[in-house]
């Protein structure tokens, strides 16, 4: 009798290097399944430009349904210059919004932890980033990206920044709950000095905080937060913020790890979750077997932690990534002038070999 725990995963490689790093993720999943007695039922679908080319849509309703029927979604990367001239709602990136809305994903989690072997790869000083560990919790379903009315006219264009109490409460609770597993500190980032919507955000976060007396809460303006992240990232634990500010601040934290190719992310909802690397499709290196698969593999580790609650497997996979880097193996994007570079497949195999050694 087969007693393996089974998870159904929607696999959306997307475009460009998304295809290559997804292949790496699938190799890692195969190893995880063997080591932890799991079974992954993989459902492959097209998304982004690949879906446009075949179906005329960046994400078909059928593909979305596959995602809805799955325990988690693994996404590679969407986009490319080939589709730049399409209408905004027809571009590959529109597939992101359809996925987020269709799966009701309201929180984006993006960790930024510097790897010891890459401290010199960051443009920030080693002593500034060493020992930092930041988790950005970004509200994903509201704010100016989704507010109505919005329009583009000949003489003006406008967007609406709107938040409801419900939207703020649920993301605040997620940040406070997550901080309990870390250092119990939350920094809420807004622009309450000039925006009514941000003052409302600050007031609601403080109300929710009354239920979390064990958590230290501080408020910080978004412009100051951007400065503080590069001045002294060690002061932060969990950063809770709105959609627009989170979009900007999470890319700033890329400098802590040294490369966008190192950053995984998770988009979480009440019933669904999607895991993807932060980097783009990098069409200029697609198909050359030189893309960095670590962000995608790190996203698999986040899936193990947040969806499957398999904390040991997640820890082992993160440790494998760190240990391989410590051994002096680097892909082209993170290699120093005198480092030996290895390919996408070689990096993946090194990580799998290390993972299997624990």
Image (cartoon, rainbow, N blue to C red):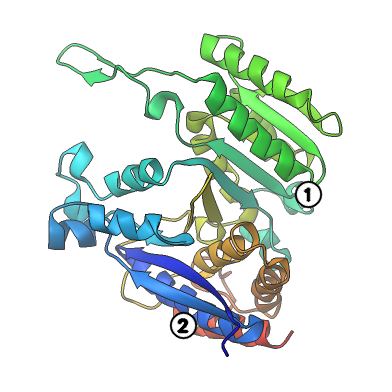
239 and 42: which one is in front? 42
Q: Where does label 2 land, which residue?
A: 345
Residue 128 x, y percent position in the rendering: 75, 46
Q: Is residue 298 above or below residue 220?
A: below
The quadrant holding residue 214 is top right
Residue 185 x, y percent position in the rendering: 79, 36
Outermost front residue: 1
Rendered-image quadrant of the C terminus: bottom right
Crowd class of label 1 (few under 14; some 14 to 19; many from 20; radius 10 Å) = few
Tag shown at residue 292: none
The answer to whether residue 273 of the structure is visible from this angle is yes
Q: How many marks can you see?
A: 2
| Residue 152 appears left or right of 303 | left
The quadrant holding residue 327 is bottom right
Residue 197 x, y percent position in the rendering: 52, 14
Q: Where does label 1 land, which residue?
A: 181
Q: What residue is at 14 percent from the left and 15 percent from the top? A: 154
The quadrant holding residue 184 is top right
Query: Which of marks 1 and 2 precedes in the sequence?
Result: 1
| Residue 38 appears left or right of 277 | right
Residue 49 x, y percent position in the rendering: 22, 57
Outermost right residue: 214
Q: What residue is at 58 percent from the left and 69 percent from the top? A: 336
């Amino acid at each position: 009798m087969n007693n393996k725990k089974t998870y159904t995963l929607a696999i959306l490689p997307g475009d460009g290097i998304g295809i290559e790093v997804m292949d790496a993720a699938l190799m890692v999943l195969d190893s995880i399944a063997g080591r932890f007695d799991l079974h992954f039922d993989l459902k492959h679908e097209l998304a982004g430009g690949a879906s446009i080319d075949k179906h005329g849509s960046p994400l078909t309703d059928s593909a979305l349904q596959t995602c809805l029927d799955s325990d988690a979604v693994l996404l590679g990367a969407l986009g490319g210059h080939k589709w730049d001239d399409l209408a905004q709602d027809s571009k590959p990136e529109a597939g992101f919004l359809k996925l987020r809305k269709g799966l009701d994903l309201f929180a984006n989690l993006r960790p930024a932890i510097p790897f010891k072997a890459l401290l010199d790869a960051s443009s920030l000083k080693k002593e500034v980033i060493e020992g930092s560990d930041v988790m950005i919790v970004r509200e994903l379903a509201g704010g100016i990206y989704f507010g109505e009315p919005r329009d583009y006219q000949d003489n003006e264009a406008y967007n609406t920044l709107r938040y409801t109490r419900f939207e703020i409460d649920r993301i605040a609770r997620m940040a406070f709950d997550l901080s309990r597993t870390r250092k119990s500190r939350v920094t809420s980032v807004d622009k309450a000095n000039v925006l009514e919507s941000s003052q409302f955000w600050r007031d609601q976060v403080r109300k929710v905080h009354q239920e979390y007396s064990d958590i230290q809460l501080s408020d910080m303006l978004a412009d100051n937060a951007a400065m503080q992240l590069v001045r002294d990232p060690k002061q932060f634990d969990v950063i809770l913020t709105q959609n627009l500010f989170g979009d900007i601040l999470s890319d700033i934290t890329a400098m802590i790890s040294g490369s966008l190719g190192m950053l995984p992310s998770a988009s979480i909802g009440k019933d669904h979750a999607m895991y993807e690397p932060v980097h783009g499709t990098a069409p200029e290196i697609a198909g050359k077997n030189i893309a960095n698969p670590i962000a995608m593999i790190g996203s698999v580790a986040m899936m193990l932690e947040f969806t499957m609650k398999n904390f040991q497997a997640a820890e082992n996979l993160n440790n494998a990534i760190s240990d391989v880097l410590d051994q002096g193996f680097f892909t082209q994007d993170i290699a120093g002038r005198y480092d030996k570079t290895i390919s996408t497949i070689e990096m993946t195999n090194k990580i799998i070999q290390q993972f299997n050694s624990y």
